[in-house]
Amino acid sequence: MKVSLFVTCLVDGFWPDVGESAVKVLRRAGCEVSFDPRQTCCGQPAYNTGYTDEARRVAAVMIDVFAEDPAEAIVVPSGSCAAMIHHAPRLFEEGDPRRAKAESVAARTHEFSSFLVDTLQVVDLDAKFSGRAVWHDACHGLRELGVKDQPRALLRKVDGLELVEAKGEPTCCGFGGTFSVKQPEVSVAMLDTRMAVLEETAPDVIVSSDVSCLMQIDGRVTKEAKPGAPRIMHLAEVLASR
Amino acid sequence: MLDPAQSPEFRARALTALANKNQSAAVARATSTISDRRDLALEEVPEWQEWRERARLIKAHVLENLDTYLEQFESNAKRRGVTVHWARNAQEAIDLIFDIGKRAGSGAIVKAKSMATEEIGLNHALEAKGWEPLETDLGERILQLDGQMPSHIVAPALHLSRDDVADIFVRELGVDRTNDPSELTAIARRVLRTSFAKAALGISGANFGVAETGSILVLENEGNIRLSTSLPKIHISLMGIEKLVPRFEDLALYLRLLPRSGTGQRLTVYQSMITGVDPSQEGPEEMHIVLLDNGRSGLLAQPDDRQTLQCIRCGACQNVCPVYRAVGGHAYGAVYGGPIGAILTPHLSDGPQAAELPYASSLCAACRDVCPVKIDIPKSLLRLRAKAVKDGHRGRLEKVGFRAWARTMERQGRYERAMRSGRMFQGVVLSDGAAGKVARSPMTPLKAWMTERAPRRLAKKSFRELWKEGLIDG
Ligand code: SF4
């Protein structure tokens, strides 16, 4: 299948390894992967802060780029960005030709793990990784896109990996876009609450598929520099390892 | 109502709350206990999703036809001897209650727990006139003694520990110190008993009003609402205009839905249905219902956000909200805190403090998934944020920042140049040296990030550069 990667601005700039791993995994799953360098950002930061005009301007560019992309699927290694693309049609009035375009782009857009499991129906990617892993459910993936069982199914097939479950209902890591810098204290308090629950499982690695959460968790773990702290990895990185 | 005694900024209030470790622990403990109980109670109801959908549909239908149902409610209540009053805003409601109350003559004023009366600041208004309304709900009574606002819709004193309550009782009632819950309850009860015996005026809210019969329904666990509404000569119920259900039989659903969602109970201990007055029987001689608008009809006129009025005040969204769990209700600086408060308060109060509340959320959407009447809270938060931007309630820096961001992101060339310069300067900006400190002046988001989190550095080569150079292989 021909897939186009919407790599997201955060992966592009800060976590290129995640993008690289995603490409590897998709190719291993039999996909032909393309990347259109005209892409930048989905517009989520502005949209979530109430800057509708700015979000619309940026989303429009992204929609135009992907609307003419011949790929059958657009794959995003970040749940919140994928969710934003699903919300994007709302930014354009009924009757605006961009709305129809945005809807067709949204219909072809998939979060990474759900693309593998739901669309390609692949769970075994022949990956090897030794250690205990706990999955952090990212809110937008979980509650907007129904990403819950897919990443777990993928991780269970990783040779050498022991998947453990955190207790209770998953809670937010506290990132929330501009929330993380507008309310830094509350944001970090939420993170610490989440981390305590995740760390109870004594994981070697915390895995997620939303770069925003990774940014938040990694930032705290790096700052605290506690000995024996778990590593933070994107699902694509785990699946790419052998 | 907003709390004028607190800082107008959410961040400052949140900081105060976070610094109070006892309180944070109490809030975290209580909210997770209630949430767990709720989850257990829902396990018994496989058709929960159908309940939610029906509950939403009935409420949405009422809101679409509210004028008709209000008229029906009024005429049915009147037919049964109730006097119905209309209050456009808090002041009108206070004046009405004061005028009615005057006729009760001397004697105690007993108050049942009611968020609507909190919303209009009734106690303060009555106290300013020299009256002494007595809260009869234990949680509310504790808060009244200490001059605090409720911090939770259902459990108003949820932020207090047993020891906090003991301190308040020793200080305000001069009793011997005990932190045993049943002894504390007994102390409160002693005071209340004497007041009930002398009560001339009872003031309550209402959980539901029934259009077809003109009845009101009040739910509780302590029994004081039943006493407050039946012992005094005059009973006044203050009810938001959105509280109606069309038919008596609709209550069968909400009677079960609300307690399960709110406290994880199958039913509340008491359910009091009050349908009119009959002077020939025992009970109040007069019953008055004050229908409160206070911003609600304005909200009703906004089809996208009207859903906010479906709320049955169960508090589930507060219990599950990670922001609320971290900071508690007082940090919201408003009578209604948590997710529901963040979407309701801006419609009840004006100004920047109310406009800031929709930003007190990470948009995690946990609230939407628990809400028993399926209010899409995150969607309303987003719309209110867009409105705050439009109304000019956001800072200049943020506005300029997003303009520049959009300019950068809408052109590949600018985006790539920005990334290159970011890479060039990040060494200095993120350094511990003087230049770094200046660059991270107190205003910048970077500083806010870096206080407790390490910054992630831009990679030496971006994904697009690796791709272009053919370095991505499979
Ligand atoms: S918004 Fe929903 S969950 Fe929150 S208090 Fe109202 S009914 Fe309950």
Image: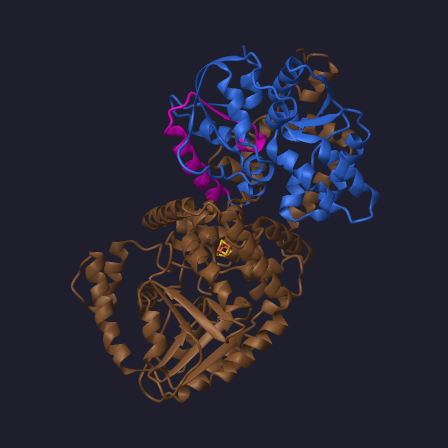
Chain colours: A blue, B brown
Q: Which residue is found at the position 45% from the left and 50% from the top?
A: B324
Q: How many labels does the image show?
A: 0
Classify B209 as above or below A102.
below
Q: Which residue is found at the position 71% from the left and 43% from the top?
A: A55
The answer to whether residue A167 is seen in the rendering is: yes
Looking at the image, which is closer to me, A74 or A123? A123
Name the image quarter holding residue A167.
top left
As drawn, the residue found furthest toward the front would be B249
Q: Taking B26 as reference, is B300 left or right?
A: right
The answer to whether residue B133 is seen in the rendering is: no
Q: Which residue is found at the position 63% from the left and 58% from the top?
A: B305
Looking at the image, which is closer to me, B12 or B312? B312
Classify B469 as above or below A134.
above
Q: Position of residue A9 (x, y in %)?
A: 66, 30
- Which image quarter is the C terminus of chain B in? top right
Query: Magenta segment, which residues?
Result: A184-213
Verify whether residue A29 appears in magenta: no
Classify B146 as above or below A133.
below
Name the image quarter holding residue B157.
bottom left
Predominant secondary structure in magenta?
helix
Classify A4 as above or below B21.
above
Looking at the image, which is closer to me, A50 or B158? B158
Q: Position of residue A237 (x, y in %)?
A: 56, 19
Q: Where is residue A195 in the image (x, y as percent from the top left)?
A: 42, 33
Q: Position of residue A230 (x, y in %)?
A: 43, 23
Q: Which residue is found at the position 80% from the left and 25% from the top?
A: A70
Looking at the image, which is closer to me, B362 or B268? B268
Verify whether residue A210 appears in magenta: yes
